[in-house]
């Protein structure tokens, strides 16, 4: 009887992986809920204050590292990967080194992945329910206190690299993660092993030295945190290091040797919208608030709001080569924005003036 139950569970697991691939997930893995080691690492990270202003990282206590506390009855986690790389990495590098171009992290160029992946995960859950009958589950896509990277590593999707992103050995790291917590007893996949070795390319390339040690990122220094999560002023000492990065940062992925195996996404929804892969700083700085809302509809970018969008671009304009056009644009904006943005504009103007001398 036990053998029959195990065989049925194995068959179901294989079907789940097959259905997941049909729905556009490049990899599906299954693991249990034991995250004791990851929980200790999280506590150490929080104690060091590396979470900065992201108070939500500790607000939910152990629910983040103990799935059954977040969703009672959870005994298995289905972890999925969806690739999002929208263009050749050489083109990304060219955008990054052009000081007048507005660089947006490539994950945010297309449609907001949260909605797309949640919908696919729901379809996967529906297929499972058609097979098993009603069962307990909940789908997550970066939407709740979930340790998605640790779960993906345990489910065999890849290992957590020194930059803290998950890396798949033959696919790189340009992908999103999602999960289904469930009460189904499913067989576990083998955890992924680490293949970073002695490489420290990501540590060396980080523009703000946010990767303070292998596998340790101080979010307070991270460009993604500074341009997306941070509510207030960007620290003065870090502004020159942001270059033309106005939303997120891809440096550590671009330099990772494993990303030579990365494939372009097949998802049309992840293709760049509104030419954000090639927009110029002056162009996006001129957007009114309504234009910002219109042009970022359905995008992850919209969450930072128009004022922080302008804050970030003002810093990038201050980092750009001296230009009369840039100075004029900054002066024209100085009277119709918040105090937060005005301060960053003043800084940018001072930087521009210093370069003109």
Image (cartoon, rainbow, N blue to C red):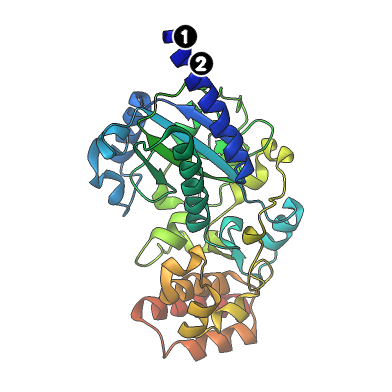
Q: Does residue 126 lie above or below 228 as drawn?
A: above
Image quadrant in which you'd find residue 287: bottom right
Instruction: Locate residue 27, reporting x and y percent.
Output: 60, 36
Badge 1: few (under 14), some or many (20 or more) residues near its Cα, within 10 Å?
few
Total numbered labels placed on residues in the image: 2
Instruction: Locate residue 83, reporting x and y percent.
Output: 62, 46
Q: Secondary structure at mark 2?
A: helix
Is 340 in front, or is 88? 88
Q: Secondary structure at mark 1?
A: helix
Who's the residue at 47% across and 34% down the image? Answer: 78
Q: Does residue 148 lie above or below 29 as drawn?
A: below
- Give the left or right position of residue 27, taking residue 278 as reference: left
Who's the residue at 63% across and 74% down the image? Answer: 274
Q: Quadrant of the N terminus?
A: top left
Residue 351 visible in rendering: yes
- Give the left or right position of residue 100, taking residue 81 as reference: right
Q: Quadrant of the C terminus?
A: bottom right
Who's the residue at 61% across and 25% down the image? Answer: 195
Is 211 in front, or is 146? 146
What is the spatial separation of the Cα atoms under label 1 and label 2, in whole angstroms? 6 Å
- Give the left or right position of residue 317, taking residue 31 as reference: right
Residue 209 visible in rendering: no
Badge 2: few (under 14), some or many (20 or more) residues near its Cα, within 10 Å?
few
Pointer 1 residue: 3
Who's the residue at 30% across and 44% down the image? Answer: 49
Q: Are marks 1 and 2 in contact (CB under 8 Å)?
A: yes
Is 306 in front, or is 120? 120
Instruction: Locate residue 70, reporting x and y percent.
Output: 28, 39
Q: Which disc, if any, is residue 82?
A: none
Q: Does residue 91 lie above or below 1 as drawn?
A: below
Pointer 2 residue: 7
């Amino acid at each position: 009887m036990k053998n029959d139950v195990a065989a049925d569970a194995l068959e179901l697991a294989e079907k789940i992986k097959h259905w997941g691939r049909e729905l556009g997930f490049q990899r599906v893995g299954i693991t249990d809920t034991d995250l004791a080691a990851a929980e200790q690492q999280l506590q150490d990270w929080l104690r060091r204050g590396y979470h900065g202003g992201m108070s939500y990282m500790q607000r939910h206590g152990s629910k983040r590292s103990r799935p059954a506390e977040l969703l009672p009855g959870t005994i298995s986690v289905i972890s999925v990967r969806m690739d999002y790389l929208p263009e050749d990495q050489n083109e990304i590098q060219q955008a990054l080194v052009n000081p007048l171009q507005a660089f947006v992290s490539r994950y945010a160029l297309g449609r907001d992945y949260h909605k797309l992946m949640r919908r696919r995960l729901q379809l996967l859950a529906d297929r499972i329910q058609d097979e098993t009958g009603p069962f307990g589950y909940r789908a997550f896509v970066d939407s709740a206190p979930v340790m998605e990277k640790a779960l993906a590593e345990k489910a065999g999707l890849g290992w957590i690299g020194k930059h803290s992103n998950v890396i798949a050995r033959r696919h790189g790291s340009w992908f999103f993660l999602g999960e289904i917590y469930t009460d189904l007893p499913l067989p576990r996949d083998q955890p992924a092993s680490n293949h970073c070795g002695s490489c420290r390319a990501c540590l060396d390339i980080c523009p703000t030295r946010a990767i303070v040690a292998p596998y340790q990122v101080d979010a307070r220094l991270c460009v993604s945190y500074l341009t997306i999560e941070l509510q207030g002023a960007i620290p003065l000492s870090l502004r020159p290091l942001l270059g033309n990065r106005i939303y997120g940062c891809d440096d550590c992925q671009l330099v990772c040797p494993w990303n030579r195996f990365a494939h372009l996404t097949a998802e049309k929804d992840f293709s760049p919208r509104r030419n954000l892969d090639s927009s110029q700083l002056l162009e996006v700085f001129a957007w009114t608030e309504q234009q910002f809302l219109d042009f970022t509809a359905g995008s992850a970018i919209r969450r930072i709001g128009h004022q922080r969008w302008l804050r970030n671009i003002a810093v990038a304009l201050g980092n750009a080569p001296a230009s009369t056009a840039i100075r004029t644009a900054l002066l024209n904006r100085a009277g119709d924005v918040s105090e937060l943005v005005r301060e960053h504009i003043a800084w940018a103007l001072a930087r521009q003036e210093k370069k003109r001398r």
